[in-house]
Image (cartoon, rainbow, N blue to C red):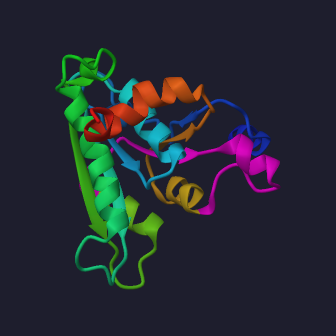
Amino acid sequence: CTNIADVLNRGNSCSLICIKVDEPDMLPIRRKQVFVVSVSLNKSSTKAFLDALRLSKPGDEIHVVYVKSYLERADSDYTAEARLKYEGFFTAFRDKQQSVFSKFHDRFTRFEVVSKERRESVPQAVTRYADQVDADFVVVGANMKDRVSRGKKPVGSVSLQICLLFERNFVVANWIDISPKVYDENVRSAASPASAQQ
């Protein structure tokens, strides 16, 4: 735990994989892995999704989870935008013209809107869903360099609480600034195929 805390508190440019379970039959070896990715519209949660993709293998499941308010009955504009963003990625997996994302066509992906229960926090809602689907990993995003430069802890409180609450393994995906041209061509266009065609 000390080593993990040291890595996180330095605001390094790396992502972190933490294996909490050590029983051989609990490790996702020679079987399907299940990832639950906690997302919003920020770049760090996009990185969490991309890291889950890169860690996955054919046949694995990636559940993209967005938590909405207990009082939100119909999708808000923000919820609808988050759904559209990730469904754009899923569409890109089936598009053979997408030289990068089409390589992940053989993953099972779904976007799930989880409603918070009364007096339930976002981390509790994410871990509840992860437990329901028997997830091997929860994946959260962080923009460590930016947060540390502003005098904040490298990992936000919501992401950190998800990692602490989930009893199995977790990944903290650290956003690293890349060339805007690379981001636009490979990430933004995949997430928003309609806008990319305009």
Q: Is residue 146 above or below residue 106?
A: below
* Residue toward you, 105 or 24: 105
Position of the C terminus, as image quadrant, is: top left
Magenta-drawn segment:
131-157
How many numbered marks does the figure carry?
Answer: 0
Residue 133 colored magenta?
A: yes
Residue 63 visible in this rendered orientation of the protein: no
Residue at image position (22%, 39%) is: 109
Is residue 22 visible to us here? yes
61 relative to 106, above or below: below
Q: Position of residue 29 (x, y in %)?
A: 32, 24
Decide: is 196 above or below 155.
Answer: above
Residue drawn at the location 50% of the way across and 58% of the way down: 162
Residue at x-position 33% and y-position 63%: 79
Report whether 130 appears left or right of 20: left
Q: Nearer the viewer, residue 164 or 63?
A: 63
In which quarter of the view is residue 14 placed?
top right
Q: Position of residue 173 (x, y in %)?
A: 54, 38
**Residue 13: quarter of image:** top right
| The magenta stretch spans residue 172 | no
Q: Is residue 40 left or right of residue 94?
A: right
Q: Tell me the quarter of the image containing the N terminus.
A: top right
